[in-house]
């Protein structure tokens, strides 16, 4: 079977989901193939509402991509790895964020749009991102359990910790697309 290569000017439609969390937290994104995995990292941080305060890496085809912090690590520099060269239609990448909490994101390449736009957009999604440093999937599950039970002895402390504005069901695609448009303009300027 012949697999058509992804061209520099194509756009990839990705489905990205946070693993080991129910109900699902996911986003559907369209990104230019010329973006590097470092650019994808920035887009994922915005798309999910992470605060970019922890280490991360990507795995694709058995290869680890990221920012090399130790010369003994076997890792490919994500800044020199274009998404279109790493991804393939129907293929998957794994994005790890926060090696302590261990947030794993499954990225599935759903399709390729020929001659697409340089604008990163979110075309769908569900639920809010978990708060940073909540203890990964098990800690987030506990957080949701405590927040749902006003009689729990930790309820008041957890409610104060996450803030009154935290709503695990909230997802605002219009606000997200404004932030992604700003990122798109900055990355497109760097492309030239």
Image: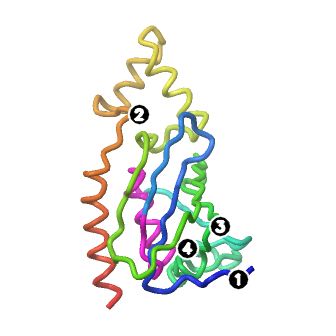
Q: Which residue is mark 3?
A: 91
Instruction: Give me the disc on residue 2.
Output: 1
Q: Quadrant of the N terminus?
A: bottom right
Q: Answer whether residue 177 is magenta in the image.
A: no
Residue at the extreme top: 151
- Look at 54% across and 50% down and name the residue there: 17
- Find out whether the residues at labels 1 and 4 contact each other: C-beta distance under 8 Å: no
Residue at the extreme bottom: 192
Instruction: Give me the disc on residue 67.
Output: 4
- Between 72 and 107, the one lying in front of the other is 107
Q: Earlier in the sequence, mark 2 or mark 1?
A: 1
Marks 2 and 3, how far apart at CA: 29 Å
Residue at the extreme front: 1
From this view, report whether residue 141 is shown above or below residue 4: above
Question: Closer to us: mark 4 or mark 2?
Answer: 2
From this view, report whether residue 15 is shown above or below residue 156: below
Question: Closer to us: mark 2 or mark 3?
Answer: 3
Q: Earlier in the sequence, mark 4 or mark 3?
A: 4
* Residue 127 percent across, percent down from the top left: 42, 39
* Residue 103 percent across, percent down from the top left: 57, 49
- Find out whether the residues at labels 2 and 3 contact each other: C-beta distance under 8 Å: no
Q: Which residue is mark 2?
A: 168
Marks 1 and 4, how far apart at CA: 33 Å
At mark 4, the secondary structure is loop
* Residue 68 percent across, percent down from the top left: 59, 75
Question: Closer to us: mark 2 or mark 1?
Answer: 1
- Look at 38% across and 56% down and name the residue there: 123
Question: What are the residue bounds of the magenta stretch?
Answer: 30-52
- Between 30 and 86, the one lying in front of the other is 30
């Amino acid at each position: 079977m012949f697999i058509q290569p992804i061209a520099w000017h194509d756009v990839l439609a990705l489905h990205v989901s946070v693993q080991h969390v129910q109900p699902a937290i996911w986003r559907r994104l369209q990104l230019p193939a010329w973006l590097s995995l470092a650019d994808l990292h920035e887009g994922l941080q915005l798309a999910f509402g992470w605060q970019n305060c922890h280490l991360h890496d990507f795995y694709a085809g058995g290869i680890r991509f990221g920012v090399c912090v130790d010369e003994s690590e076997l890792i490919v520099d994500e800044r020199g790895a274009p998404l279109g060269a790493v991804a393939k239609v129907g293929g998957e990448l794994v994005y790890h964020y926060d090696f302590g909490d261990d947030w794993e994101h499954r990225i599935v390449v759903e399709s390729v749009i020929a001659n697409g736009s340089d604008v990163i957009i979110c075309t769908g999604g569900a639920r809010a991102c978990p708060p940073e440093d909540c203890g990964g999937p098990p800690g987030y599950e506990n957080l949701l359990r405590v927040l749902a039970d006003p009689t729990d002895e930790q309820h008041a402390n957890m409610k104060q910790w996450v803030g009154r504005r935290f709503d695990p069901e909230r997802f605002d695609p219009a606000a997200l697309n404004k932030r992604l448009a700003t990122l798109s303009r900055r990355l497109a300027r760097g492309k030239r």
